[in-house]
Image (cartoon, helix red, strand yellow):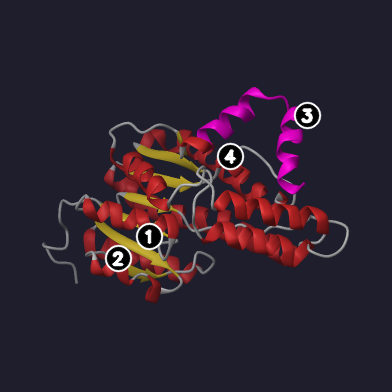
Amino acid sequence: MTTSSSRSSRPVALITGASSGIGLATALALLKKDWVVYGAARRTDRMTEIEAAGGRTLEMDVTDDASMQSGVDGITGAHGRIDVLVNNAGYGSYGSLEEVPLDEARRQFEVNVFGLARLTQLVLPGMRAAGRGRIINISSIGGRIYEPLGSWYHATKFAVEGLSDSLRIELAPHNIDVVIVQPGPIRTEWNAIARDSALEISGDGPYAAQARALHGNYHRVDHSPMSAPPEKVAATIVRAATVRRPRTRYATPVAAKLIVGARRALPDRLMDVVLARLAQ
């Protein structure tokens, strides 16, 4: 049952993929701003830090419609609204297009694109009724550039970029903002999952040399000065959530801005040469 105390004036945020990395850091950062924060992930046991900081946690799988519907209904029932949705859940599975099973390719789209889209569908009626809201989609510099052995992952992030751009115009008449955040090299579990999957799928056979080189280069990037902690991205997300008029895109950290800038400046063939070095 909804109580008057639960319908506070504090802004309400729902953050997916909140069990680690960027999602966890964002939840903690918004809690410090005195927001009502719901962290959502498949494993609630990994979100005890959010609860300890005064947040709430939800068991949610963005490939399971019932869990998403239940989560949104629970939040709106308790608070009457969701002010900001941070679509952060996602992962990168690498390997040559020839060797990645289509089931794995489909799963990446289910998590990175369709889960994001479905959760957005679920929160929009409430945002439209309130006459305001903000959708923050965590894309990647991988939505602007490309890498060998990363075709399926990059396809999902290019999709997120296009979806978000169309949605931004679509929702403008309803006073709902759509913001894209493009993280670059960040020290999270993502890097290890991506590089290990490249070896697992393509470590033997015709793409083995590329897979081994990519694995080594990703490992070096993860431990290099150009790689930033997830709190750096969280600070950008907080800014995107709280400013009166957010930008349409935020690339972060500085390395991400440089990479996106290079993509705009360089012709495709020269960019191919630069990016091919990741797998050499």
Furthest-bottom residue in this view:
45
Residue 35 visible here: no
* Residue 219 in view: yes
Give the foreground label among 1 and 4. Answer: 1
> Which secondary structure, mark 2?
helix
Give the left or right position of residue 99, taking residue 75 as reference.
right
* Part of the protein shown in magenta: 256-280
| Helix, strand or loop: magenta stretch | helix
Q: Which comes before the other along the chain, label 2 or label 1?
A: 1
Q: Residue at x 15, y 51 (%)?
A: 9
Which amino acid is tagged 2?
A: Ile
Please give the label number shown on residue 120. Answer: none
**Residue 42: image location, x then y, percent:** 46, 71
Quarter holding residue 123: bottom left
Give the x, y percent position of residue 68. 44, 65
In the displayed structure, 239 sits above or below 94; it is: above
* Residue that badge 4 annotates: 162
When the figure is inspected, residue 218 is found, relative to residue 75, above or below; the finding is above
| Spatial CA span between label 4 and label 3 | 23 Å
- Is the C-beta separation of discs 2 and 1 under 8 Å? yes
Which residue occupies the extreme left position in the image? 4
Give the quarter of the figure containing the N terminus.
Answer: bottom left
Tags 4 and 2 touching, CB below 8 Å: no
Front label number (4 vs 2): 2
Q: Tell me the crowding category of disc 2: few under 14, some 14 to 19, or many 20 or more residues within 10 angstroms, Cα based.
A: many
Residue type, numbered disc 1: Leu
User: Where residue 153 sits: x, y (%)?
Assistant: 65, 52
Q: Which residue is mark 3?
A: 269
Q: Secondary structure at mark 3?
A: helix
Q: Which mark is residue 24?
A: 1
Q: Marks 2 and 1, Cα distance to the nearest angstrom? A: 7 Å
**Amino acid type, residue under disc 4 in the picture:** Gly
